[in-house]
Image (cartoon, helix red, strand yellow):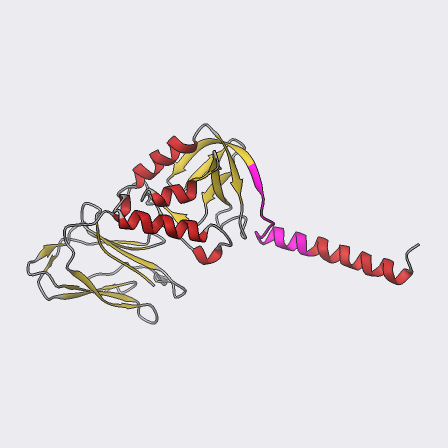
Amino acid sequence: MLSTKKAFVISLLLTLIIYFFDLASKNGYFVLKKEYYFVSKVIDGDTIELSNGERVRLLGINAPEISEPFGLDAKEYLSKMVEGKNVYLENDLILRDNYGRLLAFVFIDNKNINVDLVRSGLAHTFELNKLSKYVKELKDAEYYAMANQLGIWKKSNITCIKLVDLKISGVEKVVLKNECNFSIQLKNWILEDESHNRFKFPSYLFKPNETIEIYSNNKTAKFSFNKNYQIWNKEGDSLFLRDSEGLLVLFYRY
């Protein structure tokens, strides 16, 4: 028989294991696992709904919103791949996001759909620092899409707009310069970060050698997102500047 001391130690260990298991589960952290589910509907390019009513946000990627350029393409591509089919889900370190959605890698026929969307240029990588796996695969997929100008990486004919400054602390702002030898009408151009905080330019003629400033929150400025929170993530973010057709003019990641 176990001694009283050994029995106490075992009991204490079991109690601690149960406690931390419960704590981890409540905070969204869990062991890695794979489970099969039926996809009843595709919501957009990075969100699906299962037959049990759960919504799943694909990990490590961010697809354009449906109303944005290539957003409908991303949704249609994902629908073709998984809608009405059985997939298996593989969780990583965090089980759910702030909206209560499951976070997972989605697989069908051993294909990582998250990676496939990035490789097809229909999503960019997102919050890779929060992942424990498939980081290299996602980075390689994005590099391929960028190199081949697929989807969201298709470049505009205008390549002479330069990023002069990106201030990510204090009064946030983006400073752009027109190094072209001609003026550019900025109407309906889009400046956004990787979380899809978007600024749509009004009608404005951007003259040669002119610099403009786009603030995160400055109601008196000519250009401002007018957000009451910081846009540019200090831990790392991406800047996209797109022309009125949604083609990529400028990309910067830090």
Q: What's the residue at 32%, 43% (across, down)?
A: 122
Name the outermost residue toward the top.
84
22 magenta-colored? yes
Q: What's the residue at 33%, 42% (across, down)?
A: 120
Q: What's the residue at 6%, 61% (across, down)?
A: 181
* Residue 81 higher or lower than 93, as above or below: above
The mark tally for this picture is 0
Tell me the quarter of the picture where residue 238 sits: bottom left
Tell me the quarter of the picture where residue 63 sits: top left
For the N terminus, which image quadrant?
Answer: bottom right
Q: Position of residue 219 (x, y in %)?
A: 25, 63
Q: Position of residue 72 (x, y in %)?
A: 30, 37
Q: Position of residue 97 (x, y in %)?
A: 49, 50
Tell me the quarter of the picture where residue 82 sits: top left
Q: Position of residue 59 (x, y in %)?
A: 46, 47
Name the outermost residue toward the left.
182
215 magenta-colored? no
Highlighted range, magenta? 20-35
Q: What's the residue at 37%, 48% (across, down)?
A: 141
Would residue 168 be found to the left or right of residue 202 on screen?
right
Would residue 179 be found to the left or right of residue 65 on screen?
left
* Residue 40 higher or lower than 177, as above or below: above
For the C terminus, which image quadrant?
Answer: bottom left
Name the outermost residue toward the bottom.
170
Would residue 125 be found to the left or right of residue 190 on screen?
right
